[in-house]
Amino acid sequence: MEEQEIKRRIIEGMKEKGLKLTRQRLEIIDIIAGEKSHPSASAILAKARNRAPMISLSTVYYTLDIMKKAGLIKELEFNDRDSRYEGDVSDHLNLVCTGCGKIEDFRAPRPVPSEKVEKKTGFRVDSARFEYYGLCRECRLGGG
Amino acid sequence: MEEQEIKRRIIEGMKEKGLKLTRQRLEIIDIIAGEKSHPSASAILAKARNRAPMISLSTVYYTLDIMKKAGLIKELEFNDRDSRYEGDVSDHLNLVCTGCGKIEDFRAPRPVPSEKVEKKTGFRVDSARFEYYGLCRECRLGGG
DNA sequence: GCTATAATTAGGAATCATTCCGAATAAAAC
DNA sequence: GTTTTATTCGGAATGATTCCTAATTATAGC
Ligand SMILES: [Mn+2]
Ligand SMILES: [Mn+2]
Ligand SMILES: [Zn+2]
Ligand SMILES: [Zn+2]
């Protein structure tokens, strides 16, 4: 998924749900769509404050929350760090480096079709999360 | 993975790492191995207090932490609830019900072999997490 | 463009799972 | 049994996230 596509999709989704497109929200959408780094709420706040002079952490959290509930972005939570957010809601593998915290994307299909799961268990799938944990190239070579 | 096998594996692992097997730890291991519910720290505390009269939440967290670091159990974190723990460290899909919080297991392989990921990206995988979110049979029929 | 109104924002307080601390205890080795 | 050192406990501290309320502003309708 590419930057402009993500941005358009989120904005369209907001309009469809009747959510207002404020200065702050457009800023956040821009950052989420442009960043490949899977930024945290406070990273988004910091980036946003470089451009728009003022925006609060509450607003960042509130905005991420409604976008998440609308299915327009994904949140990834971790035990030892704060949550990270991404605009690519398609199924893919996130490679999470336990050394430096970097998150890379890796294209991959679901391990089992949702239909098969539902048929066997009655569980109806509506979203998925796939992660591999380990060390990225830099951390491995650098000596993390 | 079956209860007795999980229990033995954790106890052996503790011994190998030179970790003491205390009354409290054996209790926690018993609960983790016996429960299919993927219990939280406080659920484990509650269960443990039904049997051993005394054990503290600090101890439960401390014990879960060392077992996790030793690779003997897995922790699953969520945004809206506390972490859940499981003794089955083999790769499998966790079906997380967003209605009632129940977590079921579903046997499935990794979507991509670790070697392929490493070859393409330099990222060395050492553990994985796969989840499908949705509604379990009961929540779907009941009206969640 | 102007107005009305309901959603959004800011920022400070509150929450709550988890971690930290220091003294008391107990498992394991000898 | 004694010694050593990890473990336990309960309470305090932490910190990401949520909650609260008054002020602001995007949008719709005129
Ligand atoms: Mn990603
Ligand atoms: Mn499981
Ligand atoms: Zn790294
Ligand atoms: Zn359910």
Image (cartoon, coloured by chain):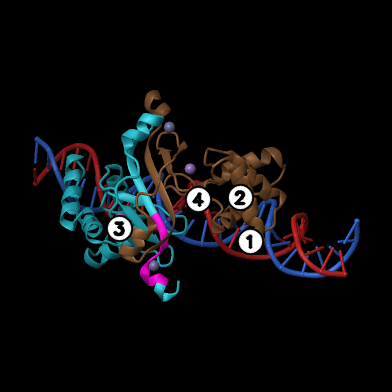
Chain colours: A brown, B cyan, C blue, D red
**Chain hosting mark 2:** A
Q: Identify the amino acid type marked 3.
A: Asp
User: Helix, strand or loop at disc 1?
Assistant: loop
Q: Which residue is mark 3?
A: B105
Q: Nearer the viewer, residue A60 or A116?
A: A116
Three-letter amino acid code at the position of disc 2: Arg
Residue A9 circle label: 2
Closer to the camera: disc 2 or disc 3?
2
Which of the chains bears the disc numbered 3?
B
Q: Amino acid at mark 4?
A: Glu
Q: Residues within 10 Å of mark 4 (few under 14, many from 20)?
A: many
Circles 2 and 3 on the same chain: no
The answer to whether B120 appears left or right of A51 in the picture is left
Amino acid type, label 1: Lys
Q: Quadrant of residue A65?
A: bottom right
Residue B4 shows in the view = yes
Q: Quadrant of the N terminus of chain B?
A: bottom left
How far is disc 2 from disc 4 in space, using C-alphas?
A: 17 Å
- The answer to the question of whether label 4 and label 1 lie on touching residues, with beta carbons closer than 8 A, is no
Q: Which residue is mark 1?
A: A17
Magenta region, residue range? B132-140
Q: How many marks?
A: 4
Q: Position of residue A60 (x, y in %)?
A: 61, 50
Q: Residue at x 39, y 49 (%)?
A: A110
Badge 4: chain ID: A
**As rendered, which of A139 and B113 lies closer to the eye?**
B113
